[in-house]
Image (cartoon, helix red, strand yellow):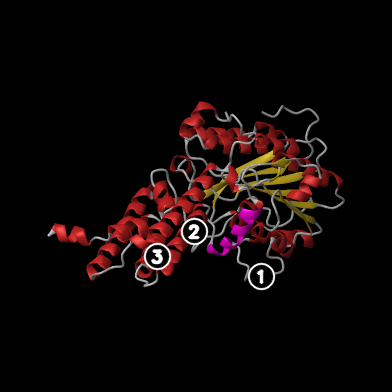
Amino acid sequence: MNEPLLKQFPWRWALFWLVGPNLALIMAWPLGGPPMADTLAISGCLALICCQAPWLWVRRLCAMALTPAVLAVYIARNFNLGVEQLASIPAYITDAAPYRSPMFITAGLTAILSMAISFTQMPRVPRFATPMNLMLGLLAVTATMRFDAYATAATRGSYDLHADGQAFTSAVAASGHEKPPADGRNVVVIVVEALGQPVSPAASAQFAADWDRPVWRTRYRVDSGTIPYFGGTVSGEMRELCARWKFDEAVPFHSGECLPQRYRAAGYETTALHGFTGEMFDRDHWWPRAGFQHFAFGTDLMRAGARPCGGVFPGACDEDVPAQIARRLKQARQPQLVYWVTLNSHLPVVEDASLGTLDCRTGGAALADESPLLCPLFAVHHHLADAITRLAMDPALPPTDFIIVGDHMPPFFARDARVRFDPQHVPWIVLHSRGRAEPARPAIS
């Protein structure tokens, strides 16, 4: 009985319609990646339908289209991007530099290979001749889904997070800055790209060294904690600015809903900064609607003196932005709300001299043993924390509160790096000003 069943199994269909279009994610199973069972089910069912088309060109086109479609969902899910944010993919291609990342290069080459296989091998794949062929093809789709569920089980909880039913909270709310300070002190909100809450020993030790600095307590009362996060960077921005879990272009900002609106009504000047292009996630359009009077992006910050930094997302160096914030705060004639979304720690963080990640040794052997991918991220965060410390401890700085918060956990593709962070929460640190710093201060580590 087994021999006829094996003969009826559509081996070529399984190889060139199921494995071929999904080659990139199947190759990633030993390393990590997001759960894709639902997408595999959809692509598998489409393959079962398309493979019966009587025209070869239709079968070729359908099989080739499955590869980029699956890969787009895969990348979006890895970075916790919503479907509505897939419209920003062209900005990744035109303004980012994915060719600087071995991960993106490998994914691209694999996609090209998959599409080439689909084009060249489709004439060799016969259409289903019996209902049993169809049933066995459906069984192959189910088996692929089960393999994916097994391979991605360890990190399943860090993908596709939804805020349904979750009581709202944010670092701004937890620190008491939803309303402008009564004494008119400045407020600086810093959303740090990929600042996650570590759960492993070496990562936790390096995090504490960077974000729990004793020198801060000579001028500030320091509070810290964790909050839930949902989605990508823009969702983190919505959380802190407008008390929403996600950004929805169809839902307008109501008067007084967002932080900059309330601060402007209280007499504050409001400014937003980001080292990349303003077209990414449409920030150049929705930031003004949220209440920002002024905003500056990568080219603006570099014209003002910031160095260019490389990596997959080239733009202004985060290390140089605090000096520009300091100038603004010192020269201002009215209270300031400054909002800054950092850039350089956007994953993947590659080896680059401008980022300070060449020959990376941050965290020492202990951090490297947890995952070799951790050192570049922590190195960028370390340089950022140094720059923020120089700003916060500047003796000439007027009284200013600093709110530092992660947007989302580091969306590492590799399992051994991703499991080093809390999959559902991000950290926040708040420096409540006690006044001007003393002229003499401890050196920055």
- Which residue matches tag 1? 252
Pointer 1: residues within 10 angstroms few (<14), some, or many (20+)? few
Percent position of residue 97, x then y? 62, 47
Percent position of residue 229, x then y? 54, 53
**Quadrant into which the N terminus falls:** bottom left
Cα–Cα gap, marks 2 and 1 = 33 Å
Judged from the image, the secondary structure of the residue bearing numbered disc 2 is: helix
**Quadrant into which the C terminus falls:** top right
Amino acid identity at mark 3? Ile
The residue located at (68%, 68%) in the rendering is 253
Question: Is residue 36 in sight in this rendering?
Answer: no
- Magenta range: 83-94
Percent position of residue 281, x then y? 64, 59
Q: Is residue 90 magenta?
A: yes
Amino acid identity at mark 1? Pro
Percent position of residue 241, x then y? 66, 58
- Residue lying furthest left in this view? 1
Disc nearer the start of the sequence (3/1) = 3
Marking on residue 68: 2
Marking on residue 42: 3
